[in-house]
Image (cartoon, rainbow, N blue to C red):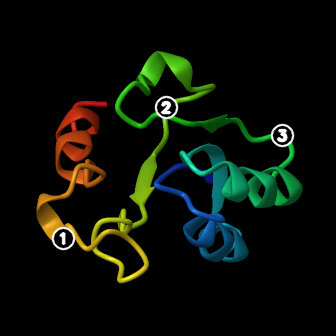
Amino acid sequence: MESLKTLELFAGIGGFSVGLERTGAFKTIGFCEIDEQCHKVLRKNWPDVPIYTDVTQLKATDLPEIPDVITGGFPCQDISIAGKGEGLNGKIRTLVGVSQTYSGM
């Protein structure tokens, strides 16, 4: 059986991909993550998988293949106590708009 292709948005260090790939049924085809420190971990564990940095600019034509599954980590910078505490009204929280963009993929 062919593996399902996954795209991980707000990837962090690839937690969704680790879990999905361990099942043997998924293959990660791309990550989108803005944090350069996270890129180091992603490149170490998935050296051949492209990393995109701006989720608001990512288009289906940028991807090597169309994903079967799109996952997204919760963009927590505005919500975390480590952040500025702006909550759901913060500027970093782009998940809602992004989910509308990718629903037509």
Does 62 sit left or right of 1 as displayed?
left
Q: Position of residue 27 (x, y in %)?
A: 67, 53
The one nearer the camera, 101 or 83, is 83
Q: Position of residue 53 (x, y in %)?
A: 55, 36
What number is the disc on residue 87? Answer: 1
Q: Position of residue 78 (x, y in %)?
A: 29, 66
Q: Which residue is mark 3?
A: 48
Q: Earlier in the sequence, mark 1 or mark 2?
A: 2
**Residue at image point 71% right, 57% down:** 37
Q: Which residue is mark 2?
A: 66
Task: Residue lying at the far front in this picture: please name it.
Answer: 84
Secondary structure at badge 1 equals: helix
Q: Earlier in the sequence, mark 3 or mark 1?
A: 3
Label 2, residues with CA under 10 Å away: few <14, some 14-19, many ≥20: some
**Residue at image point 34% right, 32% down:** 56
Label 1, residues with CA under 10 Å away: few <14, some 14-19, many ≥20: some
Does 87 sit left or right of 6 as displayed?
left
Q: Earlier in the sequence, mark 2 or mark 3?
A: 3
The one nearer the camera, 40 or 24, is 40
Q: Are marks 3 and 1 in contact (CB under 8 Å)?
A: no
Q: CA distance from mark 2 to mark 3?
A: 17 Å
Secondary structure at badge 3 equals: loop
Q: CA distance from mark 1 to mark 2?
A: 33 Å
